[in-house]
Image (cartoon, rainbow, N blue to C red):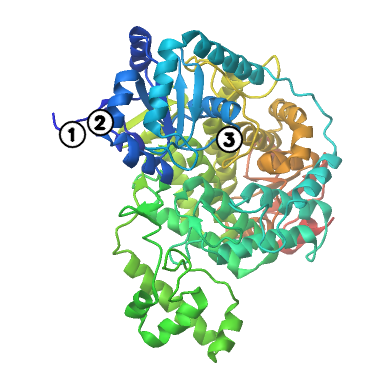
């Protein structure tokens, strides 16, 4: 078999990331009983490599090392080599990332971990170059050293592994002191979060800069909670950050959607991959900012982002794909950058000058001699410099965007990871459902319904969820975040449709979530179900990182379900989690953005609105539009007739007119039948 035609065991997988390594000369295995058995029988250490499809340095390490015949020979002779897609197996990624961080003080991807045949890590790191470079050992030297240590210093290796395993178990069993839930926790979290705010460029901290969607959502809620007014510093921080990101290179100025993060402090040069979860979370905060301020920029960015997802990240059946790569044709960002000559060839010299002035396209460029489109100056300032009418500049810019987008569509696109993940689909589903209400977009509602039907049919088996589907193959037991994201999203879909079946599904999944993931002894939800594959650790994740943690998503979903259905039992689980994490999240708020939103919900005395009437009737729609055009973060809404959900039970139209009942803190106001009356109630302190 020639090197060009050889395959390894990854050829049978569905993950595009794993399939991309199926022709490496490395004898890769997926994580499987076969691979683990082989390590035990051959008494070889395991080389575990974890990455994901949109990871730039994962591709670099593959080209440099995993496609190298000599390096592959070293790997094959001395190790059982296992390749894992972290997006499919976040349980493995969480365990071994914790271990690498213990060993090295940092982590990242690609992650390279050496394990005993019993799966216990004893050495690890991230990217390793093919030869000694910049103080890093070359990968061949590392492989030889680890193999020699395992053969000749086995006792020392096993001692190191035992110490790491003990530390992992210690972290797993860590007790969180319960803390009473008081509003002062929110105030302290706001103060600590704002201490790291970048008042010049927006966002928090310095480079690299990640879009802080959950922290911004918490600040926007805090703006409402503290009644600080339109000129308040919290709203200003949210707006400054959203504005700078929308004008920066981190935002795709032609096609919509956000890249993963900015390598600089001012949001100019992104790492060009696009992740579904970022665009789910960011589209939501832009929708919410539009509801608070009414500013067209926020609506435009939200709609362009959601439209990008529908155009490029949605399967024919309605599932949402995972990621798009940073690279195309072997170069990072090549798909997205422009030269002045390229702009002029598309637009003509005259208009190209104005377009380039607006989007910062220069001969010297801002990225490797080319240009990432960004908007460093307001349109009015550019128009004055060019002695153009601002409206005329706007027409030129919009024409240029259309023409350059069409031209760009002819380029080789970055690869797309088209596997569909339950949790990430839940995040995106909630965004479409809420945007449908806030922006009166029936197409977004239809997309949300199709997605829910897809997930609940294709990512389900025997009443349980599965993690991933690609093509005809759905597999892997779902994790906490999958169940929790779907519960949370289905509540929003109910509020977008008022179809009780979505609440029924949310309740069913909530019961599985509690039965299979809750820790009765110490509280909190485990990352994996009680009947999941046995691993060396069963952690709980409370931290909101790039995506919300399963615990924070569970809190949000269970709290909202509890209010809609008057089921206090569900809220008690959420309260226990919040009490466990109260002190850490008030002290380190950037790590708990979504959990802080759940705490804000709990402490706000949430408002319950029941609209008695046919959801499809024009009169009822006027009342619902009055609700959803406002930013009312700590509110649940039921609509219809009869007793489903409990919030609508006993509510009836008034004088044959649809009526809205607004309740809070166990007290209800008199029902109202006009949008004006309802608006006055909603705006009252």
> Residue 180's quadrant in the figure?
top right
The residue where tag 1 is placed is 3
Left or right side of 400 for 582: right
Residue found at x 45% / y 34%: 137
Q: Earlier in the sequence, mark 2 or mark 1?
A: 1
Image quadrant in which the C terminus is located: bottom right
Q: Earlier in the sequence, mark 3 or mark 1?
A: 1
Q: Where residue 202 appears, x then y in whole percent? A: 67, 60
Distance between the Cα atoms at labels 2 and 3?
29 Å
Secondary element under disc 1, as helix, strand or loop, is loop
Residue 213 in view: yes
The residue where tag 3 is placed is 106
Secondary element under disc 3, as helix, strand or loop, is loop
Which residue occupies the foreground of this view, 673 or 656? 673
Residue sitting at the far left: 1
Left or right side of 148 for 26: left
Residue found at x 35% / y 25%: 30
Which residue occupies the foreground of this view, 495 or 573? 573
Question: Dots 2 and 1: beta carbons under 8 Å?
Answer: yes
The residue where tag 2 is placed is 25
Q: Where residue 133 appears, x then y in whole percent? A: 44, 41
Question: Dots 3 and 1: beta carbons under 8 Å?
Answer: no
Distance between the Cα atoms at labels 3 and 1?
35 Å
Residue sitting at the far bottom: 387
Q: Earlier in the sequence, mark 2 or mark 3?
A: 2
Secondary element under disc 2, as helix, strand or loop, is loop
Residue found at x 50% / y 80%: 357
Instruction: Please rate how many residues cluster around mark 1, counting C-alpha atoms within 10 Å: few if below 14, some from 14 to 19, many from 20.
Output: few
Q: Where residue 52 appears, x then y in whole percent? A: 42, 38
Instruction: Please rate how many residues cluster around mark 3, counting C-alpha atoms within 10 Å: few if below 14, some from 14 to 19, many from 20.
Output: few
């Amino acid at each position: 078999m020639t090197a060009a035609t050889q395959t390894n065991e990854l050829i049978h997988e569905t993950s595009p990331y794993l399939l991309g390594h199926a022709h490496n000369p490395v004898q890769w295995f997926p994580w499987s009983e076969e691979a683990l058995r082989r390590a035990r029988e051959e008494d070889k250490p395991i080389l575990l490599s974890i990455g994901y499809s949109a990871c730039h340095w994962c591709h670099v390490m593959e080209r440099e090392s995993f496609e190298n015949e000599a390096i592959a020979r070293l790997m094959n002779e001395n190790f059982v080599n296992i390749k894992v897609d972290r997006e499919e197996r976040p349980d493995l990624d969480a365990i071994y990332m914790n271990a690498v961080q213990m060993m090295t003080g940092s982590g990242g991807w690609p992650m390279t971990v050496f394990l005993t045949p019993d799966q216990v890590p004893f050495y690890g790191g991230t990217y390793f170059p093919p030869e000694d470079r910049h103080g890093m050992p070359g990968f061949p030297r590392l492989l030889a050293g680890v193999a020699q240590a395992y053969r000749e210093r086995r006792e020392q290796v096993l001692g190191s592994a035992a110490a790491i395993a003990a530390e992992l178990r210690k972290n797993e069993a860590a007790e969180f002191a319960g803390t009473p839930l008081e509003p002062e926790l929110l105030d302290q979290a706001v103060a600590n979060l704002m201490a790291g705010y970048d008042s010049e460029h927006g966002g928090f901290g310095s480079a690299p800069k990640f879009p802080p969607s959950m922290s911004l959502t918490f600040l926007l809620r805090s703006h409402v909670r503290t009644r600080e007014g339109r000129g308040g510093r919290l709203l200003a921080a949210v707006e400054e950050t959203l504005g700078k990101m929308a004008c920066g290179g981190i935002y795709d100025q032609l096609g919509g959607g956000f890249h993963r993060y900015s390598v600089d402090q001012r949001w100019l040069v992104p790492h060009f991959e696009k992740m579904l979860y970022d665009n789910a979370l960011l589209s939501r905060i832009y929708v919410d900012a539009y509801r608070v301020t009414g500013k067209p920029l926020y609506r435009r960015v939200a709609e362009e982002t959601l439209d990008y997802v529908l155009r490029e990240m949605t399967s024919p059946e309605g599932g949402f794909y995972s990621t798009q790569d940073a690279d195309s044709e072997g170069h990072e960002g090549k798909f997205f950058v422009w030269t002045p000559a390229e702009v002029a060839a598309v637009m003509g010299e005259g208009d190209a000058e104005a377009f380039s002035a607006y989007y910062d396209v220069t001969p010297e460029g801002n990225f490797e001699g080319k240009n990432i489109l960004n908007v460093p100056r307001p349109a009015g300032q550019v128009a004055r410099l060019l002695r153009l009418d601002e409206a005329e500049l706007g027409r030129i810019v919009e024409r240029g965007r259309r023409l350059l987008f069409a031209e760009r569509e002819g380029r080789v696109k970055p690869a797309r990871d088209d596997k569909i993940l339950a949790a990430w689909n839940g995040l995106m589903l909630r965004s479409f459902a809420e945007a449908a209400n806030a922006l009166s977009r029936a197409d977004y509602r239809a997309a949300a319904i199709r997605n829910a039907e897809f997930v609940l049919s294709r990512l389900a088996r025997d009443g349980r969820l599965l993690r991933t589907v690609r093509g005809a193959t759905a597999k892997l037991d779902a994790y906490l975040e999958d169940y929790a994201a779907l519960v949370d999203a289905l509540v929003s879909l109910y509020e977008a449709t008022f179809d009780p079946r979505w609440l029924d599904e949310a309740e069913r999944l909530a019961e599985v979530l509690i039965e299979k993931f809750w820790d009765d002894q110490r509280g909190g939800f485990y990352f994996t179900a009680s009947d999941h594959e046995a691993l060396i650790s069963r952690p709980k994740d409370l931290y909101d990182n790039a995506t919300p943690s399963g615990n924070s998503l569970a809190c949000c979903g269970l709290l909202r379900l509890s209010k809609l259905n008057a089921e206090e039992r569900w809220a008690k689980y959420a309260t226990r989690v919040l009490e466990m994490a109260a002190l850490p999240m008030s002290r380190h708020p950037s790590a708990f953005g979504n959990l802080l939103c759940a705490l804000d919900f709990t402490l706000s005395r949430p408002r319950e609105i029941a609209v008695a009437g046919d959801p499809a009737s024009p009169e009822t729609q006027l009342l619902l539009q009055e609700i959803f055009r406002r930013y009312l973060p700590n509110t649940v809404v039921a609509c219809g007739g009869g007793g489903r959900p409990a919030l609508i039970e006993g509510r009836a139209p008034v004088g044959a007119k649809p009526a809205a009942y607004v309740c809070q803190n166990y007290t209800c106001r008199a029902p109202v039948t006009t949008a004006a009356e309802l608006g006055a109630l909603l705006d009252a302190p």
